[in-house]
């Protein structure tokens, strides 16, 4: 791992939700409006507001947004946990769409299922303002040692 990669991994281990939101400006997660609310090695949470530009043709939240949020929260969480040991990359994302949403705020929460030497598995649950699960997914991450 280069010195720059080591410094980036060290910084990620202590990143605040506000810093992570700022770092994400100009990225795809920023485009959908994802804001981080918790960033720890054991849980990463984020929220966004469903808006018409995120709809699929039927006028509901596009499933690709759920997949993006699930991949993003799991990857950030896995990176924070893995820290200075290296970087992580997603190798599989399975997302289930459970409830159609047309408006409101949604919250995603990533928690670990397994964190091993070479791979991690994270579960992400997305809920609406009433606490109902609207989507869930899991992401397998490959740990890339430095």
Image (tube, grey):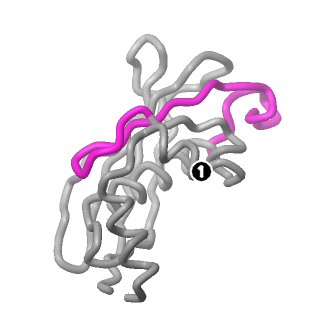
Identify the residue at image location x=78%, y=30%.
58
Residue pointed to by mark 1: 24
Identify the residue at image location x=30%, y=58%.
13
Q: Is residue 116 left or right of residue 24?
A: left
Q: Which residues are magenta?
A: 37-63
Using the image, determine if residue 131 lies above or below residue 62.
above
Identify the residue at image location x=49%, y=53%.
72
Q: How many marks?
A: 1
The quadrant of the image that shows the C terminus is bottom left
Outermost top residue: 130
The location of residue 140, given as percent across then percent down, is 35, 66
Q: Nearer the viewer, residue 126 or 41?
A: 41
Q: Is residue 63 left or right of residue 134?
A: right
The quadrant of the image that shows the N terminus is bottom left
Question: Is 5 a magenta residue?
Answer: no
Q: Nearer the viewer, residue 12 or 60?
A: 12
The location of residue 86, given as percent across then percent down, is 33, 78
Q: Nearer the viewer, residue 17 or 64?
A: 17
Q: Secondary structure at mark 1?
A: loop
Question: Is 38 a magenta residue?
Answer: yes
Using the image, determine if residue 140 lies above or below residue 28.
below
To which quarter of the image does residue 139 belong? Answer: bottom left
């Amino acid at each position: 791992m280069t010195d720059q990669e080591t410094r980036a991994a060290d910084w990620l281990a202590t990143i605040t939700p506000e810093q992570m939101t700022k770092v994400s400006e100009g990225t795809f997660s920023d485009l959908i409006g994802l804001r981080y609310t918790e960033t720890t090695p054991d849980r990463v949470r984020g929220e966004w507001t469903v808006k018409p530009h995120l709809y699929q043709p039927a006028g509901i939240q596009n499933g690709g947004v759920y997949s993006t949020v699930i991949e993003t929260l799991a990857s950030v969480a896995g990176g924070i946990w893995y820290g200075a040991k290296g970087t992580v990359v997603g190798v599989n994302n399975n997302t289930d769409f459970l409830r159609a949403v047309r408006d409101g705020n949604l919250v995603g929460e990533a928690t670990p299922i397994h964190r091993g030497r070479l791979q991690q598995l994270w579960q992400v649950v997305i809920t609406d303002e009433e606490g109902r699960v609207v989507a869930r997914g899991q992401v397998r991450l490959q740990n890339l040692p430095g």
